[in-house]
Image (cartoon, coloured by chain):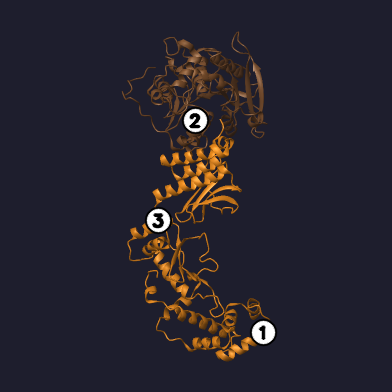
Chain colours: A orange, B brown
Amino acid sequence: MKELAGRLTALDPDAGAAVRVIAYFDRLLETRAGLEALVRGAAVLAGCPARLADEKRGVHIRVDADGRRADDEGPADPAWLSAPLTPDGPPALWLEREGPAGVVDAMVLERAAASIRAVLDRTRGSAPADAAGDQAFVEVLLDASASETARLHAARRLGLRPGVPARVVALAGGQALIQSVPPSGAASPPGGPRAGVGPAVPLLDLPASWSAALVALRLTAEGTEQDPGPRVVHADQMGGLAVLAAAIGPGSDPIPDVHALDRAAAAAPWMLATLDAVASQSSLRTAATALHMHHSTLQDRLAHAEQVLGWSVHGPQGRLRLQLALALRRLHHHAPAAAAVSDRPG
Amino acid sequence: MTTPSSPPHHDRLSPPPFDSELAAALAIVAENIPSSLLPEMIPGLQSGAVLMRPSDDDLRRGGAFEIEERTVPGPEGAPDISLLICRPAGVTGPIPALYNIHGGGMVMGDNRTGIEATLETAQELGLAVVSVEYRLAPEHPHPAPVEDCYAGLVWTAEHAEEIGVDRERIIVGGSSAGGGLSAAVALLARDRGGPALAGQLLACPMLDDRNDTVSSLQMAGLGVWDRTSNDTGWTALLGERRGGPDVSPYAAPARAEDLSGLPPAFVDVGSSETFRDEDVAYATRIWQAGGQAELHVWPGGFHGFDIMVPQAAISQAARAARTDWLRRLLAR
């Protein structure tokens, strides 16, 4: 007997095939078929492997053209035909075949994606409709005083898998992102907000990861000339800076070295970026390269900077003093707000 | 056998639902195969519009098999028959063989019908496949089909060494009408002192010409090979004798009084098909006669679901169960 894919492609694509694809998925929905049957339908009707990856809900299913379950967590090829589960969402269903899509392929993708969305909504709850809805669950998950049941429920709704560690990313602006570890994407995309990244922990320990992420966020910088430094800081790489951060509250007076940095910043527009490069690079030569300037230009500028600061930055001790001053300056700029000291996202 | 108790008196017996994936695929399958086949449709079916015939290359499976067509003597006084012999390439020495009898309701198909799935299993297990071409009803009513099948089996056993087959390990098997003919050939081999069979693989076998079980009534007009189609097939084979008192067990094995002394049987069937009850009964009667049978009833399966929709989860499970039985049988 011919197989289904053969039967479909043999049909007149304009007239018959599309109708049959629609009927096929409608029937699966009517009989309450599961996700695997829907992904298998896509694979079999298209005649190539199909995969579903819904990161939000932690669903990964891949079925080959023979209908066999063959999961593969590797990345999807951007050239494959794909469809999102929501109109403006990321691709979530792929036919592992390069375009252009024929009439049957396009219809299979469209109907399979719509059917999968319906089953996901029915069985695993609606995907968070917007950031506000999302944040409500995040809030519960990060609230150490909420019951474990409530927090685990929130974790499920956010698509976190039990037993898989997660971390909190604190974004400048107060938003919290929860990511399974290893994460599927960057903590903050290039050009995105500053981010403090909490350590990976079991789901019920996420409030602690959130606290650490907020501290890390205070050590980030805009990465501009006036606020040079890293846009993303990982809490588990802070070391003793975490202790320093705890010492700097909203009412703390800056030490003289921080005032000295502010004076230096006012003296020349290049000053802070130059000092940051010297503090963070392994040598003056690499600092000059990072700043796209000649080595001798850097030497001239440093002479000027040391005059304003009042200490030499050429030796290890001077560089440590500079690093601490830069860190303290950020900590003063990003003082913990009263609310942010608690375990709640802003 | 007769129905043990009368079916419930509803205007319409409610059938067990089809498996979800099979139901969705059935809409597409049914375009080529209507549920109810009538006698006047037989010539069209025989012309091969429905059944796809694999090419020699398909059968070779990328060089895994060597194939050969042999013309061998048919039954006494009847024409020669043709055997399609598929041997794993490069294998010498006697290996087990599956003697394959194709399906097609006694009225259609040839010795390549549905053989690709069989070859896939054979490749996995290292089996030879010998597939018999038998004469079809209604041009050739009973006993032509079953006698052709039996003659081919006798030749295979007698020439086992010549074709590299272990004559102690020949399993007869087939789907649908092929399953019924396999059961009949096993009865004939027992009663005539013919070749000793290692097993009988009866996939959704067509066993009972009376066509009056609850399942056959339940599934009327539904799925694949409904009560009307079944009537068409049996009437083609038996003419007016169908359903009457004088039907041979070699035509309809459900008629056999004695099911003892048969080789180990594998019986599978869908819960949503005409043959469900007669197939379950056949396995049950083998046990009752002190024999060995393995029975699988696949919930929501229509007739031939694993061949027509091989990708469905339940089809994969059904095929795996068959392969598994063969593996255990041959490991003994």
Amino acid type at circle 3 is Arg
Marks 1 & 2 on one chain: no
Label of residue B321 in the image: none
Picture quadrant of residue B155: top right
Can you tell which quarter of the image residue A248 is in?
A: bottom left
The residue at the far top in this view is B77
Q: Is there CB contact under 8 Å for labels 2 and 3?
A: no
Q: Which residue is mark 1?
A: A297
Q: Which class describes the residues within 10 Å of circle 3: few (<14), some (14-19), or many (20+)? A: some
Residue A141 location, quadrant: bottom left
Q: Chain of mark 1?
A: A
Residue that numbered label 2 is attached to: B30
Q: Amino acid at mark 2?
A: Ala
Task: Work out how far the residue at label 1 is from the one at label 2, CA to CA, in angstroms.
Answer: 82 Å
How crowded pointer 2 is (Cα within 10 Å; few <14, some 14-19, many 20+) is rated as: few
The residue lying at 52 percent from left, 37 percent from top is B311
Residue that mark 3 sits on: A156
Disc 2 is placed on an element classified as: loop
In the rendered view of the protein, which quadrant contains the N terminus of chain B? Answer: top left
